[in-house]
Image: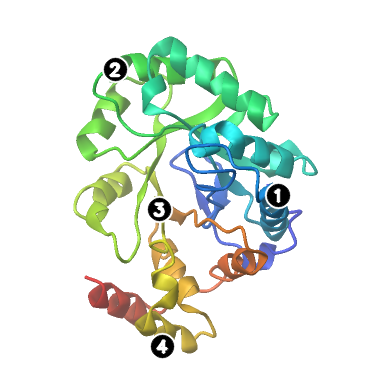
Amino acid sequence: MISKFRAIENMDVKELGRCGVKVPAIGMGTWGIGGYTTRDTTHDKEAIVALRKGIELGLYLIDTAEMYGNGHCEEIVGEAIKPFPREQVFIVSKVLPEHLCYNDVIKAARGSLKRLKTNFIDLYLIHSPNSRVPLKETMGAMEKLVGDGLVRFIGVSNFDVTEMEEARNYLSTNDIVVNQVEYSLLERSIERDVLPYCIKNQITVMAYTPLAKGELARNKFLREIGEKYGKNPAQVALNWLISKENVIAIPKAINLRHVEENVGAMGWRLSKSDVESISSYFK
């Protein structure tokens, strides 16, 4: 999949769950692109340029959701991927917790497909749990989407261990390949049980807000560590995350320099002692 990308020598790829498909260890998040919970077209052109640049450099995993910009973010992603062969881009989208009834899941997925201007979504996630809808019903709809060829793989987001186990118990021909959760040096609560469970069951952890909304990019300790590698604090923070075997990160970048910096967080590794030092510092 990545052989045609210019930055292949700097790419880290990881298998997604146990599905056999490899994706970049760092992808592109899009929360806020095209608006947050309402549509905003102010920075559409800038976003499209940044997304296309990222794909060219090998960040071919793009994470979006029907919620982002009330669907407009998916429209932007659909426009951004136009110049590329579809099989060279890995698209992740998410269904809102309000849309987890069987028919609503199908309808939501079809809406996302239309906005993305594609006939399949690579990875479709439940955005977050909804206790008012039986999970069995939702997972049945997710498997239906796979069976119909509209979705390749399924996963969840913001699920705890109990919820993951329940979801997996309702699947008959598929398994969850991803749990997308908040994870950074400043938010490590998943290390208690979610991360160990995912490692044990070969479920990829997709870390959102990996730079803690920019806070880690300004950290003095990470800057000092980075000086040894010729890297900045953000690159060190991202490299710490992807040093873990089944963790990939999806930082948002609408600035071209940030896109290039995210690519530069791959293709090298922090030493074991530096990983331990960073872990201890932020414990």
Near mark 4 (Cα within 10 A), the count class, few <14, some 14-19 or many ≥20, is: some
Question: What amino acid does circle 2 point to?
Answer: Val
Q: Looking at the picture, how far across and down is residue 148, in whole percent?
A: 57, 15
Q: Look at label 1 and name its amino acid.
A: Ile
- Which residue is identified by label 3? 246
Residue 265 seen from this side: yes
In the rendered structure, which amino acid carries the disc numbered 3? Asn
Residue located beneath label 4 in the image: 224
The mark found on residue 133 in the picture is 2
Q: Secondary structure at mark 3?
A: loop
Q: Element type at marker 1? A: helix
Q: Which residue is mark 1?
A: 48
Q: Quadrant of residue 128?
A: top left
Q: Is residue 269 visible?
A: no
Q: Which badge, 2 or 3, comes first in the chain's sequence? A: 2
Q: Mark 2 or mark 1, which has the lower sequence index?
A: 1
**Gap in Å between the C-alphas at discs 1 and 4?**
34 Å
Q: Furthest-top residue in view?
A: 103
Asked which quadrant contains residue 57, the reply is: bottom right
